[in-house]
Amino acid sequence: MLPTRRAFRVWRRNLESWKRYAVSFFVAAVGEPIFYLLAIGYGLGRFVAPMEGVPYAAFLAPGMIAFTAMNTATFETTFGSFTRMTEQNTYAAILATPCSVADIVAGDVLWAASKGMISVVFVLVLTAACGLLASPLAVVLVPVGFLVGLLFACLGMVVTARAPSYDFFNYYFTLGISVMFLFSGVFFPLDSLPVWARSFAWFLPLTHAVDVCRALATGTAGLAVVGDLAWIVVVTAVTFVVAERWIRRRVLP
Amino acid sequence: MPRVAGAPIVEARGLSKAYGDRRVVSDVTFRVEAGECLGLLGPNGAGKTTTIRMVTCFTAPSAGTLVVLHMPVVPANHAAIKARLGIVQQEESLDPDLTVEQNLVVYASYFGIPRSTAIRRADALIDFAELADHRRAMIRTLSGGMKRRLMLARALLNDPALLVLDEPTTGLDPQARRLVWERIRTLKRDGTTILLTTHYMDEAAQLCDRLIIMDDGRIIVEGTPEELIAAHVGTEVVEVYLSGGERTDVIDRLAAGPWRTERVGHVLYLYLRDGQAGAGMFGALDGLDFTRRRATLEDVFLTLTGHALRD
């Protein structure tokens, strides 16, 4: 089933109930990437040779931007959506109106992507102020942040659809999110790795997000970026369809 | 949407729901007429909630036909049907991060009600739900009764043509229940069509014009409360409390009377029809501990569904 414009009413509901928590959101979403940049980018970076022709902190910054979008969107459609679906019965309440499951899932992933984009804007402004973004093309990272957020929102929703309890998310965060954080080219270039490792990384969604972000931040965007964006769009579409179907089976048995 | 004069608001024919081999609703046929309050009664697991979920587009029937608000219940009609339904589910589902007023205004947006209209309706419904002093309160500060009244108010935002209430007072204290009943009766007086489930017989007697008693996924009887009491129990009930030391012939004499008797543990029930409460009966009861009362729906319910515990 496909969403209608009613999805924006669900998006709006999420915005209304989030306003109360906006401050704690900024601390959580922006604090982490900033601390990584300081400790790893500047701290450890002093002992690291320039990578891909830029100082290590400038190499790390676009990776942190992709990570921020991933992290924010993932939290929203795992813990956030799961709470709305189970503890709070919010989905059941909304389903008693003309809104469908597709509208709810679309509203939730659009909201998660919006939050991802908001946190990207903050990290973007901070990294630009530190002179870590070489190209004015970096402005495009704002809509890219939304797209990357959408990708991870849909992935998180698939996990949520099958989660029996909150504990289940431990698997996803350790085996999915942490693996991507460490092995998707955020901290080191993948080109130097053996073929099998690069092939593995190709299947990690964050790899493509990092590629796009870095190409735009350093102003080296070429045709490869189009391939990465296509990968992201296709996987986002497929995971949305799967998430909607599984959530529908779960809440409307 | 064409409004067919006299056509029922809900028409279910041969409605069934099975999950694999497990049949939870079997061949259920009923109507809800415009302006009436129909109650679905039954012990736990009788199929009441599943029936309601089918009527409200939450669960697809496995078999049978179902027409709600003159529209067949098929996915293409779900949004149009739900636009005119008011649903109060069993579980509390208010938004904990929003105030009482915000809960209503945000919920109205799901129906596409413009914000200015929503604020006006929310205002009137907050008064209706007697929550005027709690307009800006967060949900967690409300009592169970207040939450239930807010759920009821929320279900009325779209001025529904059919109000569906799934166990509207379960878990509430007696004062809170009475207030919810009183609000529902106000809606009835205004002509709202209501379909409700309950396992409280006093609630059914208070609110429903007509009742359906379900057990094991089937409808066992249907009628007005008075009809059901007269047909299945009688007019009066005598409960005899046995201590265990009575002579058997005393009990045999009671059991042999023209009335129906039933023994549950240490209580012997005599179900009396008109004119059976005569001198003969009181003679047989001489020296026993008993009470005499009017027959109620509870007697109908227990007679038809048995005294065994359902979990």
Image (tube, coloured by chain):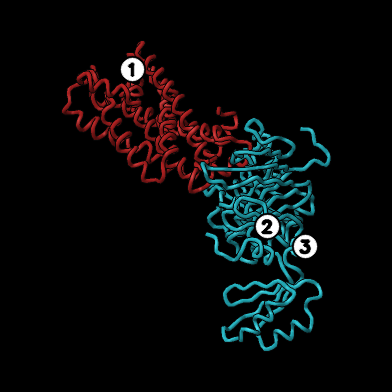
Chain colours: A red, B cyan
Which corner quadrant of the image does residue B130 belong to? bottom right
Badge 3: how crowded within 10 Å, few (<14), some, or many (20+)? Answer: some
> Does A71 appear above or below B248?
above
Q: Amino acid at mark 3?
A: Glu
Location of residue B227 in the rendering, given as x and y in whole percent from the top left corner: 78, 61
Q: Amino acid at mark 1?
A: Ala
On the image, numbered disc 1 is attached to which residue? A215
Q: Which mark is residue A192?
A: none
| Residue at (72, 77) in percent of width and height | B257
Location of residue B275 in the rendering, given as x and y in whole percent from the top left corner: 81, 75
Do tag 3 and tag 1 residues touch (Cβ < 8 Å)? no
- Asked whether the viewer can see residue B164, the reply is yes
| Residue at (83, 42) in percent of width and height | B6
| Same-chain status of marks 3 and 1 | no
Badge 1: how crowded within 10 Å, few (<14), some, or many (20+)? Answer: some
Location of residue A166 in the rendering, given as x and y in whole percent from the top left corner: 39, 45
Which corner quadrant of the image does residue A92 belong to? top right
- Asked whether the viewer can see residue B151, the reply is no
Do tag 1 and tag 2 residues touch (Cβ < 8 Å)? no
Which corner quadrant of the image does residue B290 belong to? bottom right
Q: Residue furthest right?
A: B5
Q: Amino acid at mark 2?
A: Glu
On the image, numbered disc 2 is attached to which residue? B130
